Amino acid sequence: MGNTAPAITAHLRRTWPGFALDAALDLPGHGITALFGASGSGKTTLLRAIAGLDRRTTGRLAVGGETWQDADRGVFVPAWRRPVGFVFQDADLFGHLDVRGNLAFGARRAGIADPDRRIDEVAARLGLEALLERRPGTLSGGERRRAAIARALLVEPRLLLMDEPLTGLDDRSRHEIMPWLEQLHHETRAPILYVSHALDEVARLADHLVVLEAGTVTASGPLVETLAALDRPPGLGEEAGVVLEAVLGERDATWHLARFDFAGGRLWLPDTGRPSGAAVRARILARDVSLALSPPAASSILNVLPGVVEDVAPDTHPALALVRVRVGPSCLVARVSRRSTAQLDLVAGREVWAQVKAAALVG
């Protein structure tokens, strides 16, 4: 996807009574970077700081080699001069205007030349052509969010910021908007910073993962590698696990299964109807992986993969451990009891068989 050198460099600080943001990051200039963490971890604070919406934030921010903020040099580019598109949790559309009117208002404020043409382009990109004459009150939650995203894209931003765009939507609306977000991911050249506390969204959309806790960055790196890291675990608790990228191979119509071919092995998963050859992701939780020293016989578990233990680390409870297993060039993470790690002598270099009890296609 082009140059992988960091294109967003930020070291931003903001302090309130009882809370301090102190985040140092080097982020790629393409794809989706997810800012993940529990409520109150500082995700939205960091996003607003990058947008320039809080003048009391100190530190330094550079995007694409251009300095937007540097407290030591007295540089602060105001929010209205930063080429940023911002999608808030609330779609925040004007109820007295139709969708075209909302987009036109944004186009006028941005000083866009030939706004009608640009509005039609963005509307087509997000499937809004049939909705342009409707008012926000008549739209579904997913349609309102798409209109808000269209407004953010009108300015052709160099950076797109999305603050939990699926929060507050019902399952139907979330299902409706997700394909548009995936399309945006593949078509938009500008990097996207995507705030979420839902790991299923992150697993489906993100290329890079930043985990925030109490205002500090506890993990940052490519999604697949960061989720599998035990030396700097992202503290996911019950959601600990990995994401594997692969293609769908053959399909077993008799048993409604599809083969998931990834670097290092294959898994049989429930057939979701996607065509053979489709690029997909699967999320495998640590709690759904067990380990054995020999291939199990007469087991109900379809997916058994040979691997080698790479690392063992404490889990969130003292009775448990996380074990990272190398399967070819890929990794799985298993949650097992510490008693089992001792009885099976699960140490680095031990050959094992990983039994995958469940996996979910997420993208």
Image: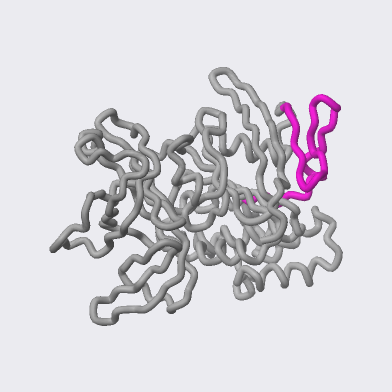
Q: Is residue 264 above or below residue 50?
A: below
Q: Is residue 95 above or below residue 116?
A: above
Q: By what rule are the colours in the image chosen?
A: one colour
The answer to whether one can see residue 342 in this image is yes
Instruction: Tell me where residue 91 appears, x and y as whole percent.
Output: 59, 53
Instruction: Tell me where residue 220 appears, x and y as whole percent.
Output: 56, 40
Q: Which range is magenta?
A: 58-87
The residue that appears at 69% across and 68% down in the rendered structure is 122
Closer to the camera in the image, 348 or 94:
348
The residue that appears at 36% across and 54% down in the rendered structure is 284
Instruction: Tell me where residue 152 appears, x and y as whole percent.
Output: 69, 56
Q: Residue furthest left?
A: 298
The residue that appears at 81% across and 33% down in the rendered structure is 76
Residue 118 quadrant? bottom right
In the picture, measured across the screen, residue 114 lies left or right of residue 119, that is right
Closer to the camera in the image, 89 or 20:
20
